[in-house]
Image: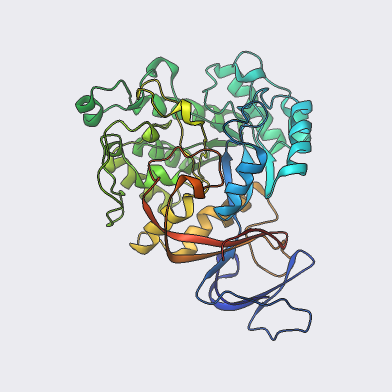
Amino acid sequence: MLRGGHVVDPTGALDRVVDIRVHDGVVAAIGILQPEPADRIIDVSGLVVAPGLIDVHVHLREPGQEWKETVGSGTAAAAAGGFTTIFCMPNTDPALDSVVALEELRRRTNRDALVRVHPIAAISEGRRGARPVDFDALAYAGAVGFSDDGDTTGHSGIMRQALEASHRAGVPVMVHCEDAGLTGGSMHEGETSRMLGLPAIPAAAEEMVIARDVALAGMTGGWLHVCHVSTGVGAELVDAAKRQGVRVTAEVMPHHLTLTDEWVAGCRNLANVEETRGPDAVPADTDTKVNPPLRTRSDSRRLLKALKQGSIDIVATDHAPHGRPEKQGRSFPSAAFGLVGSEFALPVMLALVRTGQMTLSNLVTYMSKEPARLWGLNAGTLMPGAPADIVVFDPSETWRAEPERLLSRGTNTPLIEMELQGRVKMTFVGGDERHHDW
């Protein structure tokens, strides 16, 4: 029995102190409960208890890139961040482009995973954009979406086939939107890139492909899910498509809500948050290099507004671990794109709660309830009978993001050595304790 916690569960309109009893892996009762002789009582007074978080955009790197992350380390990091369900992207080696590849991943996750893992299959063979995969077979084998993540599917005919298959299978095409003809840069194109003299990526590179893909979704009736929307115009394109009846959903990352291209220049203040996080850093820190790139303060404000208005549906992390040689000691243009996010998403989002940009209930909606609803998962709720996927966190505890304290193999984030507020204390998956920081 989790006793005396502040339970936040939007599915049951709960936002108050109650107890939760877990039995045989499910939530057995919730309310002001009397202890039973068999109960193991855990006092969680002063802590927030919520449905386990769900992250629909994670790179586990296994198979083929285990020096960056493994199923074991990636799911341990997810549990430490309060996530009980994650979707893993197909940019592995080999890519998740066949039923055999999905079966091998399932074998590894059954053996090593600490949280629930669902695979996202590739759109094209080898993610090369030339030949479509067998969409129906992959959906039947358990793929929860299709993506050539990290690479935009340039062939519009293959995108059309993928969206037609999406309509049949009921799972989305999850798109990385970036026009290859406008890439080649390393950060957002604007005043900061010009000041630093760094090659840059214009916002239009993302927006042009969003426009194409929502048009194809409207034509086919398929489900388009736009990954990591990073520009205000991109959010407006998604909103306009929704208003026209297109089946389109979208995600935004905590780093695009709170970090800006000014971080590449050395700033360490969170956007949309009236808090100073740390002293300025050396410009062109490779740990600020991510794709899509960190955009402007105006973009971060518009993204937050789009999330609160429902144009953007959910928050995901794009957890993208890299080995130190791929980031450290490299020039900014030659360093790998990507930030780790699993262990940082909750404290970053809690900064928005503390400053009144959203409520705890909103946060749980964006990071648990809504992804569960969109994908039809038996998750995202603490109502009796639901699987006991639970996160317990202290929204006030401060901690320093020291590399040796992270469970991910990757430490590539500019939040390293900064003081964060909000710490996961326990994570349960099916009633089993998967993370403990008491």
- The part of the image, by quadrant, that contains residue 230 is top left
Count of numbered circles in the view: 0
Question: Eyeballing the image, is 256 above or below 335?
Answer: below
> Which residue lies most toward the front here?
404
Whole-percent x, y for residue 171 in the image: 66, 38
The one of 342 and 359 positioned closer to us in this rendering: 342
Question: Eyeballing the image, is 237 above or below 370?
Answer: above
Image quadrant in which the N terminus is located: bottom right
- The part of the image, by quadrant, that contains residue 386 is bottom right
Whole-percent x, y for residue 262 in the image: 26, 38
Whole-percent x, y for residue 432 in the image: 72, 60
Which scheme is used to colour this image of the protein? rainbow
Q: Is residue 314 visible?
A: no
The one of 417 and 420 positioned closer to us in this rendering: 417
The one of 347 and 388 positioned closer to us in this rendering: 347
Instruction: Name the residue located 36 percent from the left edge and 24 percent from the top edge.
Output: 186
**On the picture, is 246 further left or further right than 281?**
right
**On the picture, is 215 further left or further right than 122?**
left
Instruction: Name the residue located 35 percent from the left edge and 25 percent from the top edge.
Output: 332
Image quadrant in which the C terminus is located: bottom right
Q: Is residue 101 visible?
A: yes
Whole-percent x, y for residue 436 in the image: 61, 61
Instruction: Name the residue located 47 percent from the left edge and 26 percent from the top edge.
Output: 325
> Which residue lies most toward the bottom here?
34
